[in-house]
Amino acid sequence: MIEILATSGLATVQDGGRHGSLRYGVGVAGAMDPMALAAANLLLGNEADAAAIEIPIFPFRVRFTAPCGFALAGADCAARLDGRALLPWWAYRAPAGAELVLEVPHPGACRAYLALAGGVDVPAVLGSRSTQLRGAFGGHEGRTLRVGDVVRAGRPEAAVDEFGVVPPALDMPRTQDGMRAIRVLPAAEYGCFTAASRAAFWAGDWKITAQSDRYGYRLAGEALVFERPVEMLSHGIVPGVIQVPPNGQPIVQMRDAQPSGGYPKFGTVIDADLWRLGQAPIGSRIRFVETDWAEAVAAGDETAAWLAEAGRLIGLRRLERGA
Amino acid sequence: MMDTEALAAHLAKALDGTDIGLLELRTPQGTLRLRRDGSKVVATTASHITVAASSVGVFRHGHPLRAAPLAPPGTRVRAGDPLGLLRIGALLIAVVAPRDGVVDRMLAADGALVGYGAPLARLRVDPEPPPPARQP
């Protein structure tokens, strides 16, 4: 069990997402960086998509009220356990009473994940433990965590070996001109934009504005211009869809996106790159790279293969160490 | 070269009648420390230990996300503190200090592929505390 001692806001319980409920108007939610979520869980012997705490604002401080295994992944927050410096992307054992502090992360990533042995124990709603903020259900009482909240671990007594995993972004780097490179499939209304706008979209930098969160990333760059006015009825959308409102500044739908929208769709960030975008800090600049269906599928295979191999090695290590 | 015991005896004799309180001699075999205890000169067994690789892997002086090495020479470490990391595929395993001490130097380069048992770091360890007195 952990008790929240300090939070700067917006920390939520998230798992792999609430899939299969879009037809009821329920968004997927889930971790903004599912690779970090999976890595932290695997280090503890949890299911890769078990629930953990997603922390986007720092500092964040908790106390372990009982001995418990935990793992950190995602942004490197120079974490300390009772003053002892911890390594990022690493599993540890906390004694009862120990205090864990996560500081403002090193630049380059913005969300940290705190996984607990056995996963964060909150009731599953519609098949997921993710917090659905819009509907105020799932996760911990359907809301962000507050000081004084107590969060339970599924198997706090489970054996934990202290070791780490290489951050996947180091094994599968994707940058262009020093910026995060995010692969995009052109979407239904791509052809409704001028040729110059289409070229500028791929060539220019896009800044993640301060109006970016789990719902969507609002980008700033050279405005995208419609060839002719486009009017559309609302239609289903998914995380990754890049909508263009009349001002020409695109919005990438993220995990807490509404399941429908009416803006024209310029493109879709491929599923295999959403975790990279989910770690792009506000104020950073990104590049979009045009891709096609075959490459998008191959990219999904690549991340799945990385996780499978990491999971295999972690499993062997835990077995060898009796964890 | 004479063995450590003979060397210690020789140096202790040479120190007799001086007012030198502590002598530390560093040799490739380790460090010999002579300390005055009342009127007697005693040898304490401060020395170096070599920390070896527990597995085949790539030795890293620091975490791949961080620029700074974990324990550059001169760092005081406690038993269990990481001196470096071994990368095995996607895994990272800490190479830990077996005892309290001070990092003397790294014996394998950052990024070096090392085999099982390869020397990785040298630690100047603190003298063991004396064994507790026996109850009569």
Image (tube, rainbow, N blue to C red):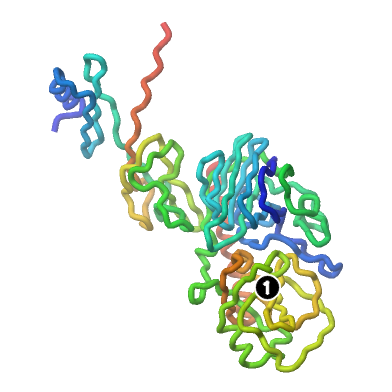
Expressed as whole percent of the image width and height from the top left, the position of residue B52 reads 37, 44
Would you say residue A85 is visible in this rendering? Answer: yes
Q: Residue at horizontal 74%, vertical 53%?
A: A144
Left or right: residue B43 compared with residue A311: left
Please state which of residues A123 and A11 is positioned toward the viewer in this rendering: A11
- The chain under label 1 reads A
Q: Residue at horizontal 37%, vertical 36%?
A: B101
Q: Which quadrant holds the C terminus of chain A?
A: top right
The quarter holding residue B13 reads top left
Expressed as whole percent of the image width and height from the top left, the position of residue A117 reads 65, 45
Determine whether the residue tagged by mark 1 lies in a helix, strand or loop: strand
Residue farthest to the right, as pictured: A24
Left or right: residue B46 compared with residue A289: left
Q: Residue at horizontal 85%, vertical 70%?
A: A23
Within-10-Å neighbours for mark 1: few <14, some 14–19, many 20+: many
Q: Residue at horizontal 42%, vertical 54%?
A: B68
Would you say residue A154 is visible in this rendering? Answer: no
Expressed as whole percent of the image width and height from the top left, the position of residue A171 reads 50, 64
Q: Is residue A85 above or below residue A256?
A: above
Which residue, given by chain and number where applicable, does mark 1 sit on?
A218
The quarter holding residue B125 reads top left
Expressed as whole percent of the image width and height from the top left, the position of residue A15 reads 71, 56
